[in-house]
Structure formats: structure tokens, C-alpha cells
Amino acid sequence: MLIIGIDPAFSQKEVFRSKDTVKEIITLSQKIDTIQQRHYKFSNTGLLFSCEFAGGRINNVTQKNDSVFTVLSSAENYPINPSPWYAFYIVSDRSRKLLIELNYTNSKHRYYPKISKDGKNWQPVDSALVEYIQPGKDKFGTGSMPASAKVTLNLNKDDTVWIAAQEVISSKNVYEWIDDLPGNKKINKGIAGYSTFGKEIRYFTIGKIKKNKPSVVIISRQHPPEVTGYFAMQQFVDVLLSNRKQSRKYRRKFVTYVVPLMNPDGADYGHWRHNAGGIDLNRDWLQQNQPEIQQVNHLIDSSTKANNSNVLFFIDFHSTWDDIFYTNTPTKKSNLPGLMDAMLLEMEKELQQGALNIKPSEKNESYVSKGYFYNFYNAESVTYEVGDNTSREIIDRKGRVAAQSFLKTLFKLYK
Ligand SMILES: [Zn+2]
């Protein structure tokens, strides 16, 4: 059900559910500001700014003088978590030095700017070219956010240069990744449903679906800017698809459902966090007012019930300031007790980088995915948070080690 523009006073009210004693925010759809992904032309200086591409977001560009411009990004709606996204490209008709100030409506600066020459391959902007305005006091978290950031660009004539908060990964990019998976014969592709803007919510299964065969569920990008979580998810999946003996055995014994992009509208329209219903999807698992959550849950629920399949493990990939594992506090016997703890222990041993940052939830709230899969599917569940700035090589390695540790532990515990 889609309700646009409901009374905000009503939406702020909290409800109590018999299943959960915790308060939750109603997740009925809110009105969002749909972005105009368009050009901003400055003919007087021969410059073009544009966010006319999937994942692009700027809400205004203002010229201070010939070489200083301010780019503004606003969220799809407020209130919202501080993950201000921006993505645009610049074309210049002459060689020049340009200073761009990144500003946000009701937010400070978070994401270290990335640069690309083709919109596909990205790297962090040289640190000598980035200056923070009113830097935050803390080393970590929202207290570390500067008011804004200035980026100096040295442009050549007719160059197109992309600047973005993180690597831009649109729904098209994600679906191309699915189509190009090396183990394409090992997977079955499907569509769980459609987003509010009519985009496909694609999924695939690894290993054939069979009666009584247990299940594993992997999701990522409920929150659009969280591409570092997506990178770790890709590596995790890659291990499950490998030709190594353990992975082959895994595919014979278990079926895996993968939904790599939970929020295609948010990803393609450069949302900071919400879907087209203006809702944080990872608050909607219990109420299920949003199409993405309804349809993905329906897929898992109907398929596992029809096949008498227990969901043993659920992993949801996100990004935040640092690498963190959010787990549940065991309050009952899950479908495979101890899997989560043993897997993280194994991972810690394998990585040899000291203790992993593991934070068990106190209340196992069902409105977030990991609580929902624990409470309703009885699955060992985890939210795997990957740092925004964790080196991409380390992300890849950890994603692979996570999958290897999962397989090793699963075979040890599942008889
Ligand atoms: Zn997240």
C-alpha cells in the first residue's frame, strides 16, 4: 500500500506491537522531493555540471566567481540519518583550476570525495586537493563530520570528470554484475517484485531449491550509499560460487537467496538513505508497509515454506564509520545454535587483526532485518557493517574470509 503525504503528526506517533515491547516508528510512506537529474550549465564560463545519470545527485549549483562553485545536495526527505550523498560530473571547455565547495541541506559532510574519468573506475581525490571547513572534533562518527569540504580540480579542455561520495553503483551496474557472475550456471535468477518507481528488485538463488534443503539469505543496500557493504557482499557470494570443494558441497546441501540491491529507487536517484516512500527500509521489517520489504519477505517466506526449508543464516551488508558486526542476543534456540558466534570467532582467528568489533543487540528488535530473521525465521542473523573508508582491498579480503569462516563453521555445526 502506498500512501503519499500522510499527516506528519500521525506518522511521528509510535506504536506498540505485542511481539515487540520496543517502540517503533510507523513506516507508512512519506512524501519525498523527487530529484531532477539534470544539467547545470554555466555558458559564461564554459562549464557544465550534471547529475543526469543513475545514482547522480545534486540539488543546486551556484557560481561564486569564474573558478569557485558551490554544489548543494539535499536529502529525499527529513529527518534522515547523516549519510549525505552527492554524485555529478563536470565538463569544461578549457583547461582550468576549479574549486568546488560541497554543501548539504541540514547535514554536514561525510563521504570523502572520489574521482573518476569514466564514471566506472573510482579513486579517492588526492588528499592535497581536499580541504575541510570547520572540521569535526572527534576522530569517528557524526562528531567527526566537517561542515563542508572543498575540492580542487585541475581540468583539461573537454575532460569529463566525475565526483561522488562513494563509487557510483546503479541498479544497472548491480544487474550487470548478476548477469556476469562467473558461476552463471550455478545460479537461478528471478524478480522478487517491483519498487515504487517500477524498478525490478532482482534476486538469485545459489544451489538448486529442493524439499527439506535448508536456506541462507543474503541482502545488501537497503541504504543506497552503502556501497562498501555491497563490495563485501560481492566477495562473500563469490566464495559461495567458487569451484572449491567446500563451496560445491555447500551448494549441494544448502540453497542461498541473494538480493544484492534492496533499494533500487534509492540507488538510482542518489538517495541519502530512504526508498521512494521516504522510509528507512531497515525499520520496516515488522510493519512491512514498503513494497521492497513486502516482496522480498514474501519471496523468502513462500519459497522456504513451500519447500519445508529452515533458514539457518541471514546476513545483511551495510556501511558505517567502521567495520562492525551487529548480532542478536540469544533468547531462544535458533535453527543452528551457535553458528553466528562460532563463525565470527573463526573469522577473527583467520584475519589475525585483533578482536572483531561485535555488538549484540539488547532487544533484538524485529523492525530491523537481523532481528526479524531471528525472531520470525529462527535464523542466526547478523548485520555486517563495513567502514566507509576501509581500504577496498581489505573489504574484499574480509568479505571472502567471512564466507570461508561461514562455510567452515556451518559444516562443523550442521549434521
Ligand atoms: Zn545501513
Image: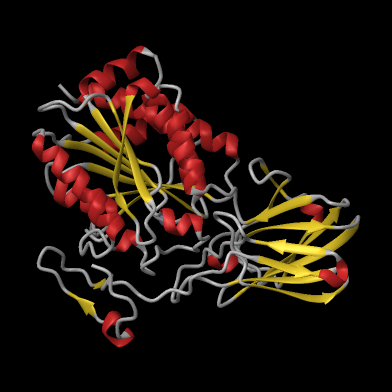
Q: Quadrant of residue 362?
A: bottom left
Q: Quadrant of residue 188?
A: top left
Task: Name the residue at 31% across, 45% down.
Answer: 382
Left or right of 59: which side holds 328? left
Q: Residue furthest top?
A: 245
Residue 206: % across, % down:
30, 28
Left or right of 88: which side holds 233? left
Task: Name the residue at 90% across, 57% down.
Answer: 94
Q: Quadrant of ligand 1?
A: bottom left
Residue 268: % across, % down:
50, 55
Q: Quadrant of residue 95?
A: bottom right
Q: Nearer the viewer, residue 30 or 382?
A: 30
Task: Name the residue at 15% across, 25% down.
Answer: 210
> Where's the C terminus, which quadrant?
top left
Task: Name the residue at 66% across, 59% down.
Answer: 88
Residue 381: % across, % down:
27, 44
Left or right of 279: which side holds 13? left
Q: Nearer the viewer, residue 310 or 207?
A: 207
> Where's the N terminus, which quadrant?
bottom left
